[in-house]
């Protein structure tokens, strides 16, 4: 059960309502659809009036011994279910769980208002539906959409535009950027900072003006303390629905396609291009001026130095196709064992 | 000597006092224990009225030529000492130095008070012993313990609790968390941010509510710009005495045992478990849903993909036992040299 | 063309003026030097009244089809130029472009003033030429030089000194440091934070006072959310002209020589020394207590565990000379292919 200081469940909901939200089939077939469920919970912690889910096979043992009243699972796990547990059968347990969890914990409606200590420029556009927290700074020429929520001590610099329903976290700073609707920008994120552009010389490196912008699409999430530099001349572009975790670094002129996922501490060097639905796992790096093809996946802690074809599964440093990586790994292990003999 | 603008030494202290604090033996035996020492200093910079230490063998040459009046060392280094230097003999020079240095530079007592520009909610609990710096924001329902120090422009969000004597650095942001006593949270740290939880789909990734908390124990240090996401449902837990360096990323549901050390830019993915006294060196990553056994040590820049047994010494990417890593490294080097021949 | 909301070109300038700024030769020789050029632009986007540049050979195709009126290139590319394009010939196209771009986009003169919501201590030195943005905090004893620009919600702690013409970005925090002239400190940077110094013990790690400073030279750039810890006793030193990208971590006692370049997410562990003009590429790590010789270059995602000689080109993890790295890589690939046969 969530700590009511920080989150409050909206339930109870009946099993029938949950099954509909999850697009799942109740099992056994004679389950009473009016039975109330009070909350979501993990397999280990759920009780008789709570609903859990099983997606990662590593947790099958927890499923077998769970006391959850109901659980969202694949049909293949029916036989693993403990006696008396109601199942919500689906091919996509995690997505189904997402729907159910959003039912219990919907986004709260925003209470509009501007804190007395916020500093809002006279010529900034701040609709009455927005909420501006204490100490936030909204500079001249800024244009906020409806219901934008600006966190405490956040800074939105001159002429930045932010779309409807976007949330800007505490202490985040935005400059030189146009941000879409329904984005979630976490605390400490830096958007629109100066790109790392200079000509090197023993006589002193010479900075190059960075006159592009950052264009952030709709439904984008940008993690805590992540940074997105503005373009040098072209823009840095983040497509619709992109999910960016914490401490991710995105260089100038980078173009990130729709639905890409960048996991914690990943770094994308300047002028790289990620086509749609690319996944870059944690701590991986993508070199500058290369292209990662549509739907490619880069494993954690990899270093991508060259173009990756669409759909590629790459890993290692320098990154190679996953099959090649494992073949080389096994060869090396065999070699080392032989050396011992 | 420390720059008095930033730090002021509390001494002088006599050699006798220092030896007692260090639990060390004065050498030579006939050393005058009333001789005053004015400050700590490095081997290279220390003068006749200062005390240095030697722990890392790489600095033996600096020890041999040091002009320090006194030095904390292991007995094995007596013969390396320059003439006239007083030694404080101990088996644990670095710990002994810690005691001595804390004598010279104790934590300053906090001057209580709330800056005029701080924003403190009417229903927040802020004892009169606390110090709240300029521009800090303490939201509704926050509960601070005695002598909590909140830095300039820090943000403590709704209902967060912070224990006695904890320091929250400038521009740090805390939400959805309960923090223990005597913690040191550095500038720009992000605690309680939304976990990176969503179900992926070509139709648009679906966010999953993150309704857990971050529970931080006592005596925990959290470095500058480090991030600790709150749990998805279970809590993210950081045990007593954990030391976290700068720019460390800790995902949702992670459990970190007592006394663990996470060095700069390390990343711990969601739902991983670190048992007590694990060390994860700089820039290393730990994959999600795995367990690192008690006292295990992960070398720098390693990528841990599987469980590590208690006491394990692992390195490489993917990480393997250190012995195996070096065996494979040597095999590869031999092979490459052979190829040249 | 730059978005006028965020950047305004100062032109037009004649080809003759641009060639002089670039120290370049106009080609063909009979080019009209009075022809006006309105702006800089990328090869792909430039039109007839704009100037582009070609430095990276990967973009030769863009050069061949560019509609730019003028382009800064090496002499070797004359034959690749599309008909009618004016060339500015130089051996250093990127540096020449830097000069031209700075002509079009000079740093704006600072409008002095202190925002009403800024908090400036009565005994801080803030010349009338400075600009202090909203919510910034300037603590007691701080000394700012002429024309220092302090961003919104930035925090400059007690007794810090900042040189003439330095810019401190929004939400950056400075403590225990002396910063030179003409530095560019980006949003969220943390300078002078406590070093990660403690003696480990099962009974509880014991913190060691960090009584050194951070000394930052002139013309230094420090990227967004980067961290530089203060020294433990000695100072942490960053030399003149050093360029530090985003999310770089620099530990206590580190000494970085003149003109070094540290690319995004690099990490330099405590007490390491970088001699002048070292380049550490993205996501690389340098172990503590080692020395990287003058002019050495560390490739991206490398882990340097030992001293590197001056001029060395190192890569891999652990880092070795680049030639050795590639030899070992090729050997492993051959071995794996043999294994398949």
Image: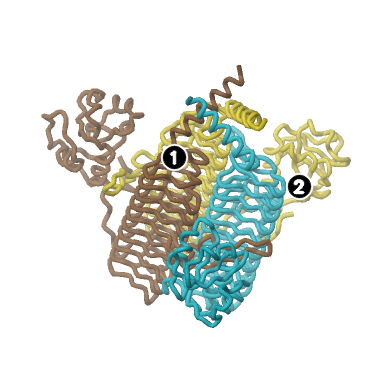
Chain colours: A brown, B yellow, C cyan
Determine the secondary structure under disc 2.
strand
Measuring from the top left, give residue B124's x and y in whole percent. Answer: 40, 56
Between residues C50 and B298, which one lies in front from this camera angle?
A: C50
What residue do we see at 63% from left, 67% from top? C162
Measuring from the top left, give residue B244's x and y in whole percent. Answer: 54, 43
Measuring from the top left, give residue B249's x and y in whole percent. Answer: 48, 45
Would residue A220 appear left or right of C151 to someone viewing this image? left
Would residue B309 appear left or right of A70 to someone viewing this image? right
Would residue C293 appear left or right of C328 to someone viewing this image? right
User: Which residue is the site of mark 2?
Assistant: B13
- The image shows residue A229, relative to residue C5, as above or below, that is above
- Looking at the rendered image, the quarter that the N terminus of chain A falls into is top left
The answer to whether one can see residue B50 in this image is yes
- Looking at the rendered image, the quarter that the C terminus of chain A falls into is top right
**Which quadrant would residue A112 be assigned to in this image?**
bottom left
The answer to whether one can see residue B134 in this image is no
Disc 1: host chain: A
User: Which residue is the site of mark 1?
Assistant: A314
Q: Residues within 10 Å of mark 2 (few under 14, many from 20)?
A: some
Task: Identify the residue at the far top of this view.
Answer: A341
**Which quadrant would residue B271 be assigned to in this image?**
top left
- The image shows residue B62, relative to residue C65, as above or below, that is above
């Amino acid at each position: 059960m969530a700590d009511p200081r920080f989150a409050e469940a909206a339930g109870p909901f009946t099993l029938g309502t949950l099954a509909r939200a999850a697009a799942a089939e109740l099992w056994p077939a004679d389950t009473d659809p009016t039975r109330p469920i009070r909350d979501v919970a993990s397999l280990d912690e759920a009780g008789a009036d709570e609903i859990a889910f099983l997606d990662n096979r590593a947790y099958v043992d927890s499923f077998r011994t769970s006391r959850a009243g109901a659980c969202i699972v694949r049909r293949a796990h029916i036989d693993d279910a403990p006696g008396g547990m109601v199942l919500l059968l689906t091919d996509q347990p995690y997505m189904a769980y997402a729907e159910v969890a959003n039912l219990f914990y919907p986004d709260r409606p925003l209470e509009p208002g501007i804190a007395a200590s916020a500093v809002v420029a006279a010529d900034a556009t701040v609709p009455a539906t927005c909420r501006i927290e204490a100490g936030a700074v909204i500079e001249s020429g800024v244009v906020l959409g409806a219901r934008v929520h600006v966190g405490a001590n956040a800074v939105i610099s001159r002429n930045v535009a932010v779309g409807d329903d976007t949330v800007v976290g505490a202490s985040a700073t935005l400059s030189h950027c146009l941000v879409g609707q329904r984005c979630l920008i976490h605390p400490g994120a830096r958007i629109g900072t100066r790109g790392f552009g200079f000509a090197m010389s023993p006589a002193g490196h010479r900075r190059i003006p960075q006159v592009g912008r950052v264009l952030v699409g709709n439904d984008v999430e940008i993690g805590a303390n992540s940074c997105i530099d503005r373009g040098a001349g072209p823009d840095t572009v983040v497509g619709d629905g992109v999910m960016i975790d914490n401490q991710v670094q995105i260089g100038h002129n980078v173009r990130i396609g729709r639905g890409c996922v960048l996991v914690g501490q990943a770094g994308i060097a300047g002028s790289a291009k990620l086509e749609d639905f690319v996944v870059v796992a944690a701590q991986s790096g993508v070199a500058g001026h290369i292209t990662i093809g549509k739907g490619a996946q880069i494993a954690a802690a990899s270093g991508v130095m060259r173009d990756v074809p669409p759909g590629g599964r790459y890993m290692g440093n320098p990154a190679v196709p996953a099959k090649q990586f494992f073949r080389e790994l096994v060869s090396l292990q065999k070699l080392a064992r032989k050396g011992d003999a």
